[in-house]
Amino acid sequence: MSPLILDTHVDIRWPEPPDWRGETAQCVDAPKMRAGGVSATVFIAYVPQGPRDHAGHNAAAARAEAMLRHISARAEREQARFCATPDALEAAHGARLLGVLSAVENGYAMGRDLGRIAHWRELGAIYLTLTHDGHNDLADSARPKPKLGDGAEEHGGLSPLGRAALAEMNRVGLMADLSHVSKKGMLEAVQRSRVPVAVTHTACAALCQHPRNLDDEQLDALRAHGGIAQITAVPSFLHAAPPNGAAQADVARLVDHVEHAVRRIGLDHVGISSDFDGGGGVHGWSDAGQTDNVTAELQRRGYGEREIALLWSGNFLRVWRQVLRGAG
Ligand SMILES: [Zn+2]
């Protein structure tokens, strides 16, 4: 059996998502997953940051729910299965079915209603990214949005509501994703969470200074609390942009970041994601059909079958199981 290759962060087009069962203009669809040997994808119900009032929160919640329902329906009438647990994902892989998973990006979609967390989990979501770009009612963002009136900091980490949301996520078994969260908020959430946390799409600040990246202190905190950093294929996180140019990166550079994290906190705390259709894509891994190139680069650098399986899904599944076991 080939290893379970899980991509933990992929956006979808919204509204009007194309039929993923056939070839699309997206980086990820069912034919590309098969071509690249991708076993499963976490598709994201992404909600852009908007006005933090009743109408804004209601619209955001409605969008998140519609996207989650669309994602789970992707597994119908296709050689695919919607997976809301690690066991279901492993069974789908064993049966050679594509795994379809879902998550919510931006706690803004919760508004101030903690009940939405259990509801999303009931709909099958596996994680919630606490913020996106711009502070929300739960936490400060690593990238404030001055256009929305953001200063550098609003809560100094998590807000009281953010702390309550984290406790509720722990209770219902919804993994906390700390991508996009400010350094203070991320470190606070790592400490407070009763179970390990994930950072599903990030890279290493030691190799590329970027507000979305984790510095070594943050990586160390993840290791100390059993969490995981999923290194992602966003060029500007991997390589500083040249003056007057766009950042460029290739698979080797992505794996440089993987190796930095592995050296710093150990192989058990590192994974890989693409952020395809949300800004991800590097030379050699520009869509799901080229995923074999990442595995080949890991092999070239001496990673064995066991290590590669851990990086592609084993570590993430371990964290996910700890989150589910800790629930209740
Ligand atoms: Zn994101």
Image (spheres, helix red, strand yellow):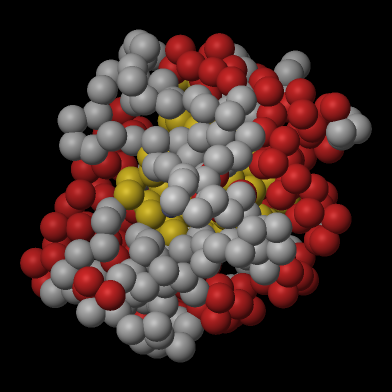
> In this rendering, is residue 270 above or below 302?
below
Among the 4 quarters of the image, the one containing residue 296: top right
- The spot of residue 203 in percent (x, y) is 62, 54
- The spot of residue 71 in percent (x, y) is 33, 34
- Left/right placement of residue 110 relative to residue 229 reads left
Q: Residue at x 33, y 46 (%)?
A: 45
Q: Nearer the viewer, residue 34 or 102?
A: 34
Q: Residue at x 39, y 36 (%)?
A: 277
Q: Quadrant of the N terminus?
A: top right
> In this rendering, is residue 141 above or below 277?
below
- Left/right placement of residue 147 relative to residue 76 reads left
Q: Nearer the viewer, residue 293 or 224?
A: 293
- The spot of residue 272 in percent (x, y) is 64, 42
Count of numbered marks: 0
Among the 4 quarters of the image, the one containing residue 141: bottom left
Q: Can residue 66 be seen from the camera position used here?
A: yes
Q: Residue at x 22, y 73 (%)?
A: 148
Q: Can residue 136 be seen from the camera position used here?
A: no
- Left/right placement of residue 280 relative to residue 16 reads right
